[in-house]
Amino acid sequence: MLLGYPGEVVTREELQKQLWQADTFVDFDPGLNRAINRLRDALGDAADSPRFVETIPRRGYRFTAPVEIAGEVASVVIGGLEAPLFFVSPGQINAQIPNELVQGNSYDVVVIANSAVTTPQPVQLNLRAPGVARFADGHVIAQHSDFSLVTAQSPAKPGEYLIIYLGGLGPGDQTVTSGSTSPSSPLDAVPDVTITVAGQSATVFFSGLTPGLVGLYQVNFQVPQNVSSGDLMLQVTEDGYAANSGLLTVAH
């Protein structure tokens, strides 16, 4: 509601009518104060030096930041930091969790879009949560050394070198700013990543951020020489944390 009237005072009475029905019994003043405080926490704002929500004593609140009203203009704030966005549609937003946040902590996520602010939702950050990119049918998105896709028509070969892509690997050996492209020299390498194909250990040559892209990881590995033909189970593990498994098509 505050975003619907940027720069204008929204009274506490107007907020009460918007948030609670007339016949609802609620301890309004403490409830509204808690809601505003949580919103400020999620936005990294403060009552004594407001950047977003200003308190107007004995009247209400005013949203002070610029608001652009347009098609699918959106922003995502996590732990008070604006997250880089990579895709926005009416039903989906892809955002990068800021690197500056501390793993092991819980942070509120707020989405601001089309003059509306979502209710803060907590998200727990873990040091690592590896996830392998797959097609809808469960096959891993893998590339040959010429960057063409591994498919049923172009399967992997035993002993061949492949590339797969992931999200959520742990920290690498370089410091990369949120929203920045990953470095190519030196590469940002993530240690302790292993791969098995049909239960056999594969040799990993590189695991880390994909150079030139943002927030995407890759693993370069060699398909074990002794695997059989077929759709074989591929499993990635990082320091004991298993990613989702996927199928890799291999043919002799």
Image (cartoon, rainbow, N blue to C red):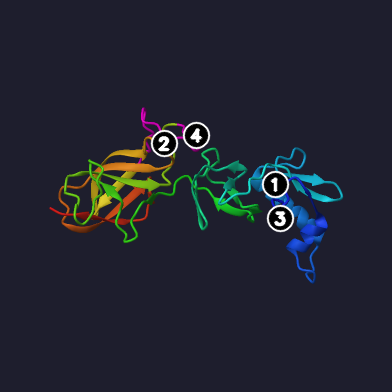
Q: What secondary structure is found at the residue carrying circle 4? A: loop
Identify the amino acid type marked 1. Arg
Q: Position of residue 180 (x, y in %)?
A: 47, 35
Front position among marks 2 and 1? 1
- Mark 3 or 2 closer to N-term? 3
What's the amino acid at mark 4? Thr
Q: Earlier in the sequence, mark 1 or mark 3?
A: 3
Label whose residue precedes the other's in the sequence (3 or 4): 3
Which residue appears farthest toward the top when viewing the image?
A: 185
Magenta stretch contains residue 180: yes
Find disc 1 in the rendering and name its residue.
40
Which numbered marker is on residue 185? Answer: none
Taking the image as shown, residue 157 lies to the left or right of residue 209, namely left
Up the image or down, 56 lies above or below 1; here it is above
What label does residue 1 carry, if any? 3
Q: Which residue is mark 2?
A: 172
Q: What is the CA distance from the residue labelled 3 to the residue labelled 2?
A: 42 Å
Task: Give the residues in magenta.
Answer: 175-192
Residue 177 badge: 4
Along the horizontal axis of the image, is 69 left or right of 226?
Answer: right
Q: Is residue 251 left or right of residue 163?
A: left
| Distance between the alpha carbons at the discs numbered 3 and 4 | 33 Å
Q: Are marks 3 and 4 in contact (CB under 8 Å)?
A: no
Circle 4 packing at 10 Å, graded few (<14), some (14-19), many (20+), is few
